[in-house]
Amino acid sequence: MATRLDGKALAAKRKAELACEVEKLNRKPGLAVILVGEDPASRVYVTSKRKDCEECGYYSEEYALPAETLEGELLGLIEELGRRENIHGILVQLPLPKGLDEKKILAAIPPEKDVDGFHAVNMGRLILGEEGFLPCTPAGVMELLDEYHIELEGKHCVVVGRSNIVGKPMALLLLQRNATVTVCHSRTKDLASFCRQADVLVAAVGKTGLITPDMVKEGAVVVDVAMNRNAEGKLCGDCEPTVYEKVSSYTPVPGGVGPMTRALLMENTMKACRMQGK
Ligand code: GUN
């Protein structure tokens, strides 16, 4: 029987630890979340972030702005939040509506408040192996793999997906642990042949049923980062559930990587609060 890597349980544990840490601080970590437009999935994410803040005893502010918001207005808000002492982390929910330049907006977040780890400075620190904020999803995957003592050194890790948010930073974090890393993407020829070589397979594409059992090595570890909806509207990952019968461990969807992403945002916000010392 394969081990189910229980992200929901580990995230709950982490959040409880953070709530204890807050009690010992003389201030509350503060997170500002900015949502522009009406994307329903983003709305759900933003609401969960507020709940996570409540659970951890953090201070939070939410800004729900109309899709027509001008770039200058959004930049002005980020600048103001950047100056605020009780706001330690600023998160702009992605994707942004058309007409807003994502690069420019993310660059406006002060790197020390960039709890998403998307700013070029934090991305650069990740590449250099320097201390900074790590993007929450790949950092959450690493914590989950560590919790279950999954060895990475010398292992062949195959990351499917090359997004700035997940695939690229995931590959770098695995590389830092001395894994041999292959990154596959939409132009990869014969994806299955790469996946079959993986000791650890990370699927981060967002395509239901992409990974089938014939693409997975017997006894591999499978991490499914995707949050797709199937034809019945049920949450599912990139892996067909029959993949789980072949592997040694896997992250379920839901209840695997998703809750860890949220816990890592809380960890990053705590780190930001400690670093800012006010
Ligand atoms: N959209 C999808 N995932 C994320 C995330 O981790 N952070 C932000 N800001 N937007 C997202």
Image (cartoon, helix red, strand yellow):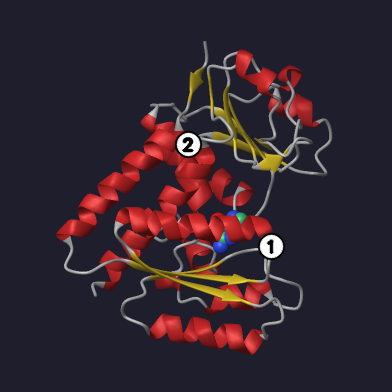
Question: Mark 2 or mark 1: which is in front?
Answer: 1
Tell me the residue that label 1 is attached to: 39
Could you say where residue 275 lies in the image, as x and y percent from the top left?
29, 67
Residue found at x 45% / y 35%: 7
Q: Pick the residue in front: 146 or 52.
A: 52
Residue 130: which quarter of the image? Answer: bottom left
Taking 225 as reference, is 163 above or below it?
Answer: below
Residue found at x 57% / y 84%: 75
- Residue 224 seen by the camera: yes
Could you say where residue 119 lies in the image, as x and y percent from the top left?
53, 68
- Residue 173 seen by the camera: no
Residue found at x 31% / y 80%: 85
Residue 159: which quarter of the image? Answer: top right
**Left or right for 97, reference 88:** right
The residue type indicated by label 2 comes to Asn
Tell me the residue that label 2 is attached to: 178
Could you say where residue 10 lies in the image, as x and y percent from the top left?
38, 36
Distance between the alpha carbons at the discs numbered 2 and 1: 39 Å
SS for dot 1 = loop
